[in-house]
Amino acid sequence: MNESTFKRTQEIIMYIADYYEQLEKRQVYPNVEPGYLRPLIPDSAPQEPESFEDVFKDVERIIMPGVTHWQSPYFFAYFPTASSFPALLADILCGGIGCIGFSWAASPACTELETVMMDWLGKMINLPEAFLAGKNGEGGGVIQGSASEATLVSLLAARTKTIRRVRSENPELTEADIMNRLMAYASDQAHSSVERAGLIGGVKIKNIPSDDKFAVCGSALEKVLQEDRAAGLIPFFFCATLGTTPCCSFDNLLELGPICNKENIWMHIDAAYAGSAFVCPEFRHLLNGVEFADSFNFNPHKWLLVNFDCSAMWVKKRSDLTNAFKLDPLYLQHCHQDSGLVTDYRHWQIPLGRRFRSLKMWFVFRMYGVKGLQEYIRKHVKLSHEFEKLVLQDKRFEICAEVILGLVCFRLKGSNELNEALLKSINDAKKIHLVPCHLREKFVLRFAICSRTVDSDHIHVAWKHISTLATELLKAQQQQQ
Amino acid sequence: MNESTFKRTQEIIMYIADYYEQLEKRQVYPNVEPGYLRPLIPDSAPQEPESFEDVFKDVERIIMPGVTHWQSPYFFAYFPTASSFPALLADILCGGIGCIGFSWAASPACTELETVMMDWLGKMINLPEAFLAGKNGEGGGVIQGSASEATLVSLLAARTKTIRRVRSENPELTEADIMNRLMAYASDQAHSSVERAGLIGGVKIKNIPSDDKFAVCGSALEKVLQEDRAAGLIPFFFCATLGTTPCCSFDNLLELGPICNKENIWMHIDAAYAGSAFVCPEFRHLLNGVEFADSFNFNPHKWLLVNFDCSAMWVKKRSDLTNAFKLDPLYLQHCHQDSGLVTDYRHWQIPLGRRFRSLKMWFVFRMYGVKGLQEYIRKHVKLSHEFEKLVLQDKRFEICAEVILGLVCFRLKGSNELNEALLKSINDAKKIHLVPCHLREKFVLRFAICSRTVDSDHIHVAWKHISTLATELLKAQQQQQ
């Protein structure tokens, strides 16, 4: 790296520092229409090298006008995506080292730091010992790219395990016979990635009706299992959700877990968003029942200040994963692999290659400390209750689901059309950004506390804005009548 | 970002700059034994925040002793993994913006730059127009995390497409009947990720015998297809490899393509390593026949200076992917999605979330220019031929496969045990790092040109080292006899 490269890096860093400082002045959602970018840049790559300055000035001219600013304190859509400086620093280091850690030998530090960081994180949320690698554990953690991949990997492991078990009990059945009778389950509130995992794995998947709290309880699962067993199907996988995407509801693990254990059903827990909250003792009870699960996953890249991608997944028996995926060509073998001491993470995931992502966890956990992470979670939860209170004070509105963590589901009392119109006027104004959901037949607005820098003032500004737009909308509607 | 954060970033950047400058003095492969890291760090995360300085000084103390230095000019193992400063700069920007681009609306710039960069890259390697998105194309490109995912995604798309076609022709067949008869194919030299894709997708996959150049030719595929059709199976997917992992051989696309087209078999091309070379006109002929393919993939994160992860995949019909994967919950819908103008990349891939990875392509393509990228490829190919020449001059050694790009497969004339011993003595010395492969019954050493900074001197040092170790080994063996 020569001096000019060093200066360029400084420029980028200063640009990002400035971006964050000025972020709340930028419009959170862009004005561009589909296809805006292509006319702004050449049809093909340049033959000759261009200067950094030429490339860099195009960032503000071409890229920024089309960015949805997820880190803006006025971004309340989807769920948060993490951004912190410790993670950014670690990611620079990860890019600099540029190693690929698919096996222990491919870069021992990359594998070993990951195993230990997953133990640290497991202990932070008080996961049962069975999920930790420790020194001689049968379980352990792995960083996946996304919760979708964690769900898929666990479904595939469950599929392989079940096929082997059923075949050993019924040698006359072919693999295809069994595949055809396998049945997976998840809440009707589960994320679309669960249905997608079933689609990819070529197995049927069925929604279990959630109750009036949008949670799956034991009796609902049992009812479906009975019907399906009677129809000759083989239930093999249940994906429980802690913190559903529509309204952050929690399936009843303490009822569901024992049923799954008794019925030989792999229980996977998807806590993609909510999982980070379990670092706070006061929210840990929401995870009770995890002891019944075979695999558990949440995304520090959502709400624990570790930049994307970092989806934390634990299994009780690592051999369940490696049995499902292990293929060993010579060019990937190394002399330590059968020692029982090493982990080759390529057998735990869909891709082969993997970056040194545990550096981000290490930097974030140490530079924030557990207390810093807890404070961060608590601030967000406090802000969501603050917003909830504002909504409740306005008789025109209703809260649509219990506010437990950082998500508030609300709507105008009235028709779905009215609420669709309200959301449209909010998102057209582009002062704040929200997305909707359906809760049963109701069209609902989701207000998710997202940004690292959001504070009480932003919440009040957002609410005042929503309330004003609602007034205008209701007035316009009255005039039409 | 306050001043101290800014200083920390500078420290990291200076550390990386220094790392690269001193890299050839570091031992390429670490001395550590499995389990080295855990005793060096605490059992659990700290409660209180630690200073950056405390974390940072542990990088050299704890991490570096366990790193396999993929960017070292003495690293000749596996295949290269890209590392360049333009990509590093872009990745910092990507982390700073911190957006998640699963749909157009989630960050229009993230989606649109990707589509245009994939067109740029497609044009650089002279891909047929049908693979480009252009303004109204039916095809287009997407960044996947790895070649494994690209293979899996194409196999799944082919599976869905075939099941629908067969069912429409034979409404009496169930999906399970068809699944059970589906048959996928790849070379016996194909990467293990192809077999894994079959495993995940729940379909049978068969190896096609390669010829004496380790390539699959048309007649070999035809023979297997005939047998399988006669047995009532449904061939639906063939994965051709350009640049196999063991020896960088090339399947015969011009023979295989027309067969696949005629037989309604999806042809996917995996050119993970070799694909980057097609930016040079003199290597482009190796891609002839791509016009018959349904999907094509290579990894700029291997050999085109775009840091991991960036696996470039194109399809001729994007609807084939979206038909296989599309699920549309309300919280992910947006008002432009059915306009036909926008791309929602979440339907093109396994995960939902995705980083702003096209920034890396944009920075690298512009700051190197096409000519700079060509020079880089040519330098590597020249160095591999230089190594080949050194091997050929030594009558004790043989070259085991034609050297076409940056990989040289070689061995001592003699037994596999002898060559296993040679590899062991090379990797035990840790001066350079290699991995082996099997070519038929032969144990072979792979010498891959990997580092961005490797030059002729390193090649000569490496060869002299190998040659000396061979002399010692042969001498020791003679004394034993």
Image (spheres, coloured by chain):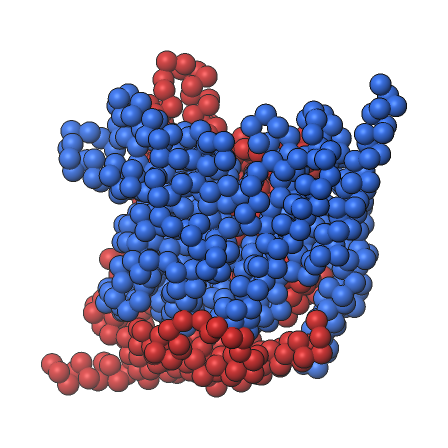
Chain colours: A red, B blue
Measured from the top left, where is residue A447 in percent x and y?
41, 69
Q: Quadrant of the N terminus of chain A?
A: bottom right
Q: Does residue B96 appear left or right of residue A184 in this picture?
A: right
Farthest top residue? Answer: A172
Residue drawn 37% across the image and 73% down it: A43
The vertical placement of A305 against A250, above or below, is below
Residue drawn 16% across the image and 32% down it: B170
The vertical placement of B447 against B360, above or below, is above
Q: Nearer the viewer, residue A331 or B108?
A: A331
Residue drawn 32% across the image and 51% down it: B291
Q: Nearer the viewer, residue A183 or A376?
A: A183
Q: Quadrant of the C terminus of chain A?
A: bottom left
Q: Nearer the viewer, residue A307 or A229?
A: A307
Q: Quadrant of residue A344?
A: top right
Q: Nearer the viewer, residue B176 or B211?
A: B211
Whether residue B20 is visible, yes or no, is: yes
Residue drawn 72% across the image and 66% down it: B16
Q: Does residue B266 appear left or right of residue B354 in this picture?
A: left
Measured from the top left, where is residue A206 in percent x and y?
32, 40
Farthest right residue? Answer: B479
Q: Does residue B251 appear left or right of residue B468 in this picture?
A: left
Q: Does residue A257 appear left or right of residue B466 in this picture?
A: left
Measured from the top left, where is residue A400 in percent x and y?
34, 62
The vertical placement of A427 against A153, above or below, is below
Q: Quadrant of residue A216?
A: top left
Farthest left residue? Answer: A481
Whether residue A107 is visible, yes or no, is: no
